[in-house]
Image (spheres, helix red, strand yellow):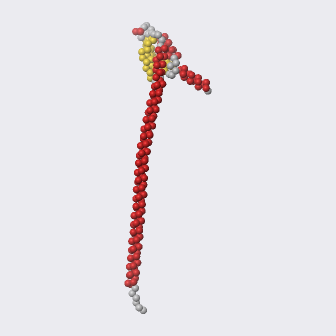
């Protein structure tokens, strides 16, 4: 039998297969590198796109926050104007009342009684004065109680003042000021009559 040496052929075959393997491995590595590169580019593009969108949203949020602040400032200014208007309307509406109170005070004061001090705090009026006698103070209190503009006169102090006469005395009292009693009674009668 003849001896055939297959070693060189096997070596060539093995070298060819190894070369083919290296070529396939190189193609796979290149394809994998390209895929990773493309995937990274896609992810970077998506991140950039999201950053642009986030920046746009941040700009819009800043603009909306500015508008919300302006709206709050406008509401605050509006409330201040409404409060001022209410105070002005109350002052305009109550302006004639002071004249009425003084007029009614003069009508209620009897002869022989002098008022020295009037001080109003809220709905309470503090009155100081001098009277020729205690009867004049009583008459003054009755007149205030019957008045349409005053309620609940209350004598807080009486001291003798002989400089103004034998029976003269200085007095202090408080009285509640109110809107006209006749108006409130008419309102109450009108409410009851309509019920």
Name the quarter where the C terminus is drawn: top right
Q: Nearer the viewer, residue 78 or 165?
A: 78
List x then y, in percent, for residue 33: 39, 66
Q: Nearer the viewer, residue 107 or 125?
A: 107
Which residue is at a point 40% across and 78% down the rendered structure image? 17
Which residue is at a point 39% across and 74% down the rendered structure image? 22
Describe residue 144's horizontal placement relative to residue 31 as left or right: right
Q: Nearer the viewer, residue 148 or 164?
A: 148
The answer, for residue 174, to whether it is visible in the render is: no
The quarter holding residue 78 reads top left
The quarter holding residue 126 reads top left
Which residue is at a point 42% across and 60% down the rendered structure image? 42
The answer, for residue 94, to whether it is visible in the render is: yes
Which residue is at a point 43% across and 42% down the rendered structure image? 67
Q: Residue furthest top?
A: 166
Describe residue 123's horizontal placement relative to residue 22 as left or right: right
Q: Is residue 61 above or below residue 45?
A: above
List x then y, in percent, for residue 44: 40, 59
Q: Residue furthest bottom?
A: 1
Q: Is residue 127 above or below residue 33?
A: above
Q: Is residue 137 above or below residue 189?
A: above
The quarter holding residue 65 reads top left
List x then y, in percent, for residue 171: 44, 14
């Amino acid at each position: 039998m003849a001896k055939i040496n297959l070693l060189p052929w096997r070596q060539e075959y093995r070298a060819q297969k190894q070369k083919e393997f290296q070529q396939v491995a190189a193609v796979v590595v290149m394809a994998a590198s390209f895929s990773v590169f493309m995937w990274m580019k896609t992810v970077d593009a998506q991140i950039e796109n999201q950053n642009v969108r986030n920046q746009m949203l941040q700009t819009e949020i800043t603009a909306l926050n500015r508008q919300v602040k302006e709206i709050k400032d406008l509401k605050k200014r509006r409330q201040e104007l409404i409060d001022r208007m209410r105070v002005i309307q109350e002052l305009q509406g109550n302006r004639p009342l002071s004249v009425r109170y003084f007029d009614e005070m003069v009508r209620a004061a009897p002869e022989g009684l002098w008022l020295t001090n009037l001080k109003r705090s809220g709905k309470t009026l503090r009155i100081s004065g001098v009277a020729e006698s205690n009867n004049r103070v009583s008459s003054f209190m009755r007149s205030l109680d019957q008045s349409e503009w005053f309620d609940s006169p209350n004598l807080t102090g009486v001291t003798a003042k002989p400089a103004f006469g034998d029976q003269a005395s200085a007095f202090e009292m408080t009285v509640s000021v109110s809107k006209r009693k006749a108006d409130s009674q008419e309102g109450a009668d009108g409410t009851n009559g309509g019920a």
